[in-house]
Amino acid sequence: MSALRKIPVDENFRMDLDGLQAAIAADKQAGYTPFLIVGTAGTVDVGAVDDLTALAAIVKSEDVWFHVDGAFGALAALSPTHARLTAGIEHADSVAFDFHKWTQVTYDAGCVLIRDPALHQATFTQATGYLAAAPRGLAGGAPWPCDLGPDLSRGFRALKVWMTLSTYGSELLGGIVNTTCGLAQRLAARINACDRLELLAPVKLNIVCFGITGFSDEQTAALVADLQEEGLFVPSTTTIKGRTTIRAAIVNHRTTAADIDGLVDEILSRV
């Protein structure tokens, strides 16, 4: 952890670029060599997207690796309406994202893309007797999956990803992004229209974080647990500026406007 630098965020929960450059300068002054910058396309807490284009420019000037954590938001690129939010992601050296979120694949199914395939394979390939390749038979073919990551034994995750992409296609999956982001805006509008509820973070994608006026952290956590245990709604909680916050992440293609309104109405009936 001593080699990790946590960069502050701005009022919109995006990486503070001045803070990043100050941290780089301080490390260089101390004799350290920065080698990696990690940007985020859709933070898990609030769905914030860093200025990836500006980060790419800093990466280029510093000659370091550029990784984008797009676990939640990278697939916004499938939507013509929201793809602009991921501008700059094309400059990344590596991108990680999850198929088990917006693309409706069952848990778990993560993915990482590496720009340089030779460097990728050289990182994980092992020259051991029991992993020796052969020109034919079961040991034939290249690369092996174990040449691309740390796992040797693994489940056939690619099958469910392939089936989902084959069934929906990128256009329909982009439509799910549009719909869920639209529902998030509907929820934000309901919150802003109510005196008892308050929006606690900008809504950029499909995540809405809000609080209940006058509620303590304990009351908020208890209300969320009640909704979950009663089988009504499944929001989660997170912490924003030290405050326990209700977090609604809208990813399911079956979620409707009635569900959004029902969540708000149910909460208001209990406060």
Image (cartoon, helix red, strand yellow):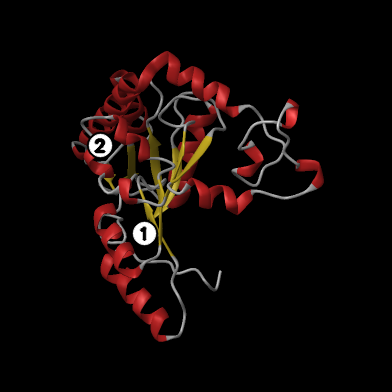
What's under tag 2, amino acid-wise? Ala
Left or right of 235 on screen, residue 158: right
Left or right of 199 on screen, residue 6: right
| Residue at image location 76% in from the left, 42% down from the top | 131
Percent across and percent down for residue 184 are 28, 33
Numbered label attached to residue 83 = 2
| First of labels 1, 2 by sequence position | 2
Which one is in front in this view, the residue at disc 1 or the one at disc 2?
2
Image quadrant containing the C terminus: top left
- Decide: is 251 above or below 72: above
Percent across and percent down for residue 100 are 49, 31
Residue situated furthest top in the rendering: 167
Percent across and percent down for residue 192 are 20, 39
**Number of numbered discs visible in the structure rendering:** 2
> Which of the pair 105/92 is nearer the observer?
92
| Residue at image location 36% in from the left, 40% down from the top | 74
Name the residue tied to disc 1: 241
Dot 1 crowding, Cα within 10 Å, few <14, some 14–19, many 20+: few
What's under tag 1, amino acid-wise? Lys
Q: Which image quarter: residue 270?
A: top left
Work out how far the residue at label 1 is from the one at label 2, CA to CA, in angstroms. Answer: 29 Å
Residue situated furthest bottom in the rendering: 30
| C-beta proximity under 8 Å, tags 1 and 2 | no
Numbered label attached to residue 5 = none
Helix, strand, or loop for circle 1?
Answer: loop
Image quadrant containing the N terminus: bottom right
| Residue at image location 50% in from the left, 38% down from the top | 111
In the rendered image, is residue 212 in sight? no
